[in-house]
Image (spheres, rainbow, N blue to C red):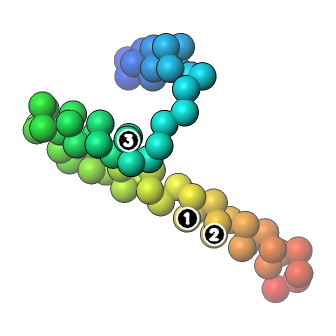
Amino acid sequence: MYFTDRGIEELQSRRGDESIAVAALAERLREFVDLFPEFETPIERFATWLARVADDDDDDDDDNYADEEGF
């Protein structure tokens, strides 16, 4: 287990049953960066990665469709 996994595990155990809107998550990330500006770059990278995850999944679906059709 990586050191950072402890925080992820705590998040999951404390808040794992909750749902959160993306807008609320974005606001919390902004608050975090305001409090800890030295983390601006990693938070920006994480937010960009998170925003593109669904796009990557859609691309994978397109690839699977193309494979099924013989393209």
Q: Mark 2 highlights which residue?
A: 59
**Residue sitting at the far right:** 69
Using the image as rendered, state which of residue 20 and residue 35 is in the foreground: 20
Q: Position of residue 10 (x, y in %)?
A: 45, 14
Q: Position of residue 15 (x, y in %)?
A: 50, 20
Q: Mark 1 highlights which residue?
A: 55
Using the image as rendered, state which of residue 20 and residue 7 is in the foreground: 20
Residue type beneath disc 1: Asp
In the drawing, does residue 30 fall left or right of residue 26?
Answer: left
Label 1 to label 2: alpha-carbon separation = 6 Å
Mark positioned earlier in the residue sequence (3 or 2): 3
Residue contact between numbered discs 3 and 1, judged by CB atoms under 8 Å: no
Residue contact between numbered discs 1 and 2, judged by CB atoms under 8 Å: yes
Residue type beneath disc 3: Ala
Q: Mark 3 highlights which residue?
A: 24
Residue at 12% across, 38% down: 34
Secondary element at image label 1:
helix
* Quarter of the rendering containing residue 28: top left
Label 3 to label 1: alpha-carbon separation = 21 Å
* Residue 1 shows up from this direction: no
Against 14, is 22 above or below?
below
Label 3 to label 2: alpha-carbon separation = 27 Å
Mark positioned earlier in the residue sequence (3 or 1): 3
Using the image as rendered, state which of residue 41 and residue 11 is in the foreground: 11
